[in-house]
């Protein structure tokens, strides 16, 4: 999976219709809603504000009054084809007086999205698993030895020692690392 490194905006004109495409790198559903609300207020005189997003395994798109499947779906197809996630794409359209037809709309919304992607960089998204490792003080040396190559996010020294670690999902071998030890493993996500 990849995501965009920065927000971007681009405008294209097709047969007098303006298509203003916004790309947003997103980190929450609330951020999606906030950006769509902002665009609705800013472009309250627009004919359509169509969008698609992919975030945290969720996908949604809207044609916002355009014929079914002619706006949101082509935007989503670009995201899926490029394996892009954590992104909201919104295309604001001002009708220019010339009907584009279903095929023309599909090409226009797809082109608006593709052109806007030229103004950002795609970067790899890493998915992490989080664990809590619990050990006695007798196993501290072993714990430190086995976690030397792990990303430790927190250390607590109380009755027992608890380390919190994050491991890139595609490289997760935590069970194998600790299989012949007395160290307890608890997955947090």
Image (cartoon, grey):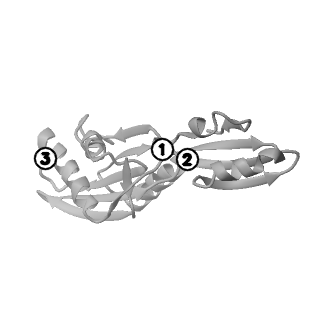
Label 1, label 2: how far apart the Cα atoms are: 7 Å
Tell me which residue sits at (77%, 50%) in the image: 140
Q: Is residue 89 above or below residue 10?
A: above
Q: Judge the density around disc 3: few (<14), some (14-19), many (≥20) Cα neighbours within 10 Å.
A: few
Tell me which residue sits at (39%, 47%) in the image: 85
Of 187 and 35, the residue lying toward us: 187
Tell me which residue sits at (27%, 64%) in the image: 10
Residue at disc 1, secondary structure: helix
Mark 2 / mark 3, whichever is N-terminal: 3
Label 2, label 3: how far apart the Cα atoms are: 52 Å
In the picture, the disc for residue 167 is 2
- The nearer-to-camera label among 1 and 3 is 1
Q: Position of residue 26 (x, y in %)?
A: 47, 54
Of 2 and 28, the residue lying toward us: 2
Q: Judge the density around disc 2: few (<14), some (14-19), many (≥20) Cα neighbours within 10 Å.
A: some
Reading the image, the residue beneath label 1 is 171
Reading the image, the residue beneath label 3 is 99
Q: Is residue 136 above or below residue 141?
A: above
Q: Looking at the rendering, which quadrant does residue 184 occupy? A: top right
- Work out which quarter of the rendered image holds the C terminus and state it: top right
Q: Position of residue 161 (x, y in %)?
A: 80, 48
Tell me which residue sits at (17%, 50%) in the image: 108
Q: Are marks 1 and 2 in contact (CB under 8 Å)?
A: yes
Residue 44 shows in the view: no
Residue at disc 3, secondary structure: loop
Q: Position of residue 152 (x, y in %)?
A: 65, 54
In the picture, the disc for residue 92 is none
Residue at disc 2, secondary structure: strand
């Amino acid at each position: 999976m990849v995501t965009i490194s920065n927000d971007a905006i681009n405008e294209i004109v097709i047969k007098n219709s303006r298509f203003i495409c916004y790309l947003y790198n997103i980190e929450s559903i609330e951020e999606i809603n906030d950006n769509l609300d902002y665009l609705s207020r800013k472009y309250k005189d627009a004919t359509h504000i169509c969008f698609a997003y992919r975030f945290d395994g969720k996908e949604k798109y809207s044609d916002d009054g355009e014929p079914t499947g002619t706006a949101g779906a082509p935007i989503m197809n670009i995201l899926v084809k490029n394996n892009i996630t954590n992104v909201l794409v919104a295309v604001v359209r001002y009708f220019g007086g010339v009907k584009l037809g279903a095929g023309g709309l599909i090409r226009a919304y797809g082109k608006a999205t593709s052109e806007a992607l030229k103004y950002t960089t795609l970067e790899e998204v890493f998915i992490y698993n989080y664990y809590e490792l619990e050990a006695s003080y007798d196993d501290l040396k072993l714990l430190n030895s086995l976690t030397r190559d792990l990303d430790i996010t927190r250390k607590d020294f109380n009755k027992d020692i608890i380390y919190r670690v994050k491991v890139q999902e595609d490289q997760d071998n935590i069970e194998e690392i600790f299989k012949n030890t007395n160290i307890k493993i608890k997955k947090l996500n």
